[in-house]
Image (spheres, helix red, strand yellow):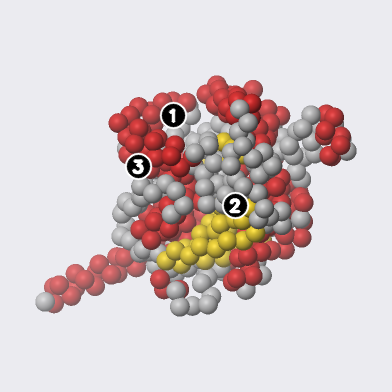
Amino acid sequence: MKLLVLLASLTVIAAVRRNDDLYGPRYRPLWDEGVKTKYTKFFGLSSSKHLIENAGFIYENYTITSEDGYRLHLSRIVHPDHAAKKDKGFPLLLLNGFLMHSDSWMVQTEMDSNMAFVWAALGYDVWLGDHRGTVRSRSHINMTSESTNRKYWDYGMDEIGTYDVKAFIDLILDHTGYKKLNLMCISMGCSLHTVLVTARPEYNDKILGAFYFVPLINNINRQLDAPAALQIALTGLELAAVSYEEQGLYETFPRLVGLKKEFFYSCQPFVYLLVSVLNWALGGASHLPKSPAFCYQAGLSVGGGSTKTVKQVVQVYKTGTLAKYDYGRKKNMEIYGQEAPPLYDVSKVKSFVAMYYSDADGFSTVEGAKRSLQTLGGTTYECMIPRFSHFDIGAGTLFKHVLPDVNAVLNSLTGYSDDREKHKSGECPSMEWIRSLN
């Protein structure tokens, strides 16, 4: 009996040490180390609920109406320890990337690598925003969302950043009573931060810090300078958007939920080949799983959007600049008062920004990231992750090695750790050792 008690005590001590070493004593995961993510085969409205509850958390959902009438959905991850508490921790708003929705934050193969769940286990109040046109945010106060309704789908990054992100922030701060939150974003989600504060600079006062993962601001790799596979993909997206519009369809991927299911079941027999081809297209820098987990990741992450947003993103890559939608010279003059669409002003971002970027991200460049860091209007922290593709943050098998640094900066900024200097240190320790991992 004494031996059993001793072994049990050592197990507890080992678990505490693991938590303390990684993320500090606040970390209360609901899973054992190395446990795989429990995916769901529900690809529609309930997918986020299933992912959150499969992880052991409590799911809450909220709806808010934007100033221009779009009804928007937010999922909230509540740790069971906080269920009865009014204060559920410092709030984090997670913004997804291009054509994605909030499930994309919860599909890493291992629970220890899923940012949304790890942050909830650290004691943060995690909110996931689904912007207009995605699977759970397809309603309006006086318009229908059929693919043929051009008026409903007449939006791009400007409307999402100016109206949707504002609405998310307002709801979260009003509901929690906090004066500020942290903004966590991937890819185009980071562009939306710049869009928001360009139009509404007063929202800098509501954001303590922003964490940019493979962001797209003024670090963009022009299409002509991008890898050949990316050039082909961007051209294909543009042609698809134009083709949809010629058919009177203004939604990207009409009947999306059905398409996601079809992809999932068609993907599994060929997953090794699919991931191998994708890895080749990304220059061999991808660390996506060559297993059925990839089929879940791709099927669950895609959220849809408008053809106008697709055309704006392609425009951004053609020019290498983050600018408002280009209507053509004549209409630009009518709308903007100038022939070219105005640029979003990165210098208006006044909050702290931690930027995690890569030297193998075909969508952006290291030089561009350095330029962005110098242009941002607040204090910054940078971390260059070697040999990481644009998709590794949300789905790659090696992101778990980066997450401890992210959490150390986050905890330092919010006061969750005794180290109040980490986020002021300017940059992470070298991560060159990641280059040798498979």
Crowd around label 2: few <14 · some 14–19 · many ≥20 (10 Å): many
Residue at left offset 11%, top offset 76%: 1
Q: Amino acid at mark 3?
A: Ala
**Residue 9: x, y in percent?**
24, 73
Of the two numbered discs 2 and 3 in the rendering, the one whose residue sits closer to the viewer: 2
Residue at left offset 40%, top offset 64%: 57
Give the labeled residue for mark 3: 293
Give the labeled residue for mark 1: 278
Task: Identify the mark nearer the N-term, 1 or 3.
Answer: 1
Q: Amino acid at mark 1?
A: Leu
Element type at mark 3: helix
Q: CA distance from mark 2 to mark 3?
A: 31 Å
Can you tell which quarter of the image residue 20 is in?
Answer: bottom left
**Residue 432: x, y in percent?**
48, 40
Q: Amino acid at mark 2?
A: Ser
Task: Identify the mark nearer the N-term, 2 or 3.
Answer: 2
Checking the image for residue 139, the label placed there is 2
> Disc 1, disc 3: CB below 8 Å?
no
